[in-house]
Image: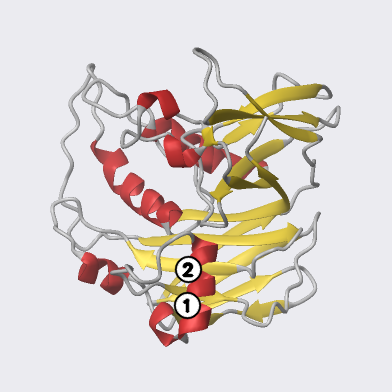
Amino acid sequence: MRTHYTILFSLLVLILLQSCEQEYIPVNSGGGLKYVVEGYVEAGENPFAPYVILTRSFDFYGSFTPDDFTAAYVHDADVRVNDGSKEVQFVEVCFSDLDSTTRAEVAARFGFNADSLAVDICVYIDLLNQLQPQIGKTYDLTIHVGGEVITASTTIPIHVPIDSLRFAPPPGEPNDTLAQLEGSISDPPGQRNFYRYFSSTNDGGFETSFSSVTEDLFFDGKTFDFTLFNPATDNGDVDPDEFGLYFVGDTVTIKWCNLDEEHFNFWNTLEYSNSNQGPFSGYTRLDANINGGLGIWGGYSVSYYKQVVQY
């Protein structure tokens, strides 16, 4: 859920960013609102069923409440995905339609609290998992809605697993309550690889860090060490001394993903723009892959790693 709101708000805010070289004054979009797509298809360990969230964008000069967010979800669209051998029509399911047990499971998967949700989330989903996503396959998305056609395509790349994960003392003064998470991978030589990670603490929802994607431009074919920041402690609401660190005794699960270049470019430009906002920032255009709308249709190859925080 946090991810979907990030996309929605970023697409609104980016058109307003101004640089010190030239002032940009937004024009009221009026009836020019866009369809916003957020959809994923996963293969690998414990993949989530392919799904698509379809909403309408908000006009900059308008105001919005939880009811407006609920109203932004687009219903009765024809959403289909073709894997080259078969085409599957996705079923629309809303959070309010689910029983309490299923609600709790879905909420945990999407990373929000089922008891405090103010918006009725609706998704189009391959409910019976008819696609059976596979690494190396391309998945073409087609949406018919309101007399318009929206298309996108994504490929699930090969998976490069994590070689090892370890917790280490954080830099600075000695500390026995916080730890830094470090990992290493062996990047395959001669091919471009793109990576993204999510983190979950104590079986909570998966979240992304302020910089969750990277590519192998500088470590192609090498064994590479890296730090995985804790997204739960990378915002302004926590003690600066805890920034990006994990608490000793917690259980952490890392969702490690490979994605294709277009999918990477979307998150790379979005995260760049999120970290470079302000009165002196430059305009950043999201590098999306949706034809006829905004957003992302992306494939992941996935593996999971679960460890208790200790060193």
Q: Which residue is mark 1?
A: 103
Side of 171 relative to 20 (left or right): right
- Measured as percent of width and height from the top left, residue 163 is found at 81, 35
Q: Is residue 118 visible?
A: yes
Side of 48 relative to 241 (left or right): right
Q: Residue 107's mark? A: 2
Residue 121: quarter of image: bottom left
Please state which of residues 292 and 187 is positioned toward the viewer in this rendering.
Answer: 187
Quadrant for the N terminus in the image: bottom left
| Distance Cα–Cα, label 1 vs label 2 | 6 Å
Quadrant for the C terminus in the image: top right
Residue 132: quarter of image: bottom right
How busy is the neighbourhood of tag 1: few (under 14 within 10 Å), some, or many (20 plus)? some
Are dots 1 and 2 in contact, CB under 8 Å? yes
Question: What secondary structure is found at the residue carrying circle 2?
Answer: helix
- Measured as percent of width and height from the top left, residue 181 is found at 63, 31
- Measured as percent of width and height from the top left, residue 155 is found at 71, 53
Tell me the residue at 38%/49% (across/down): 6
How busy is the neighbourhood of tag 2: few (under 14 within 10 Å), some, or many (20 plus)? some
Amino acid type at circle 2 is: Ala
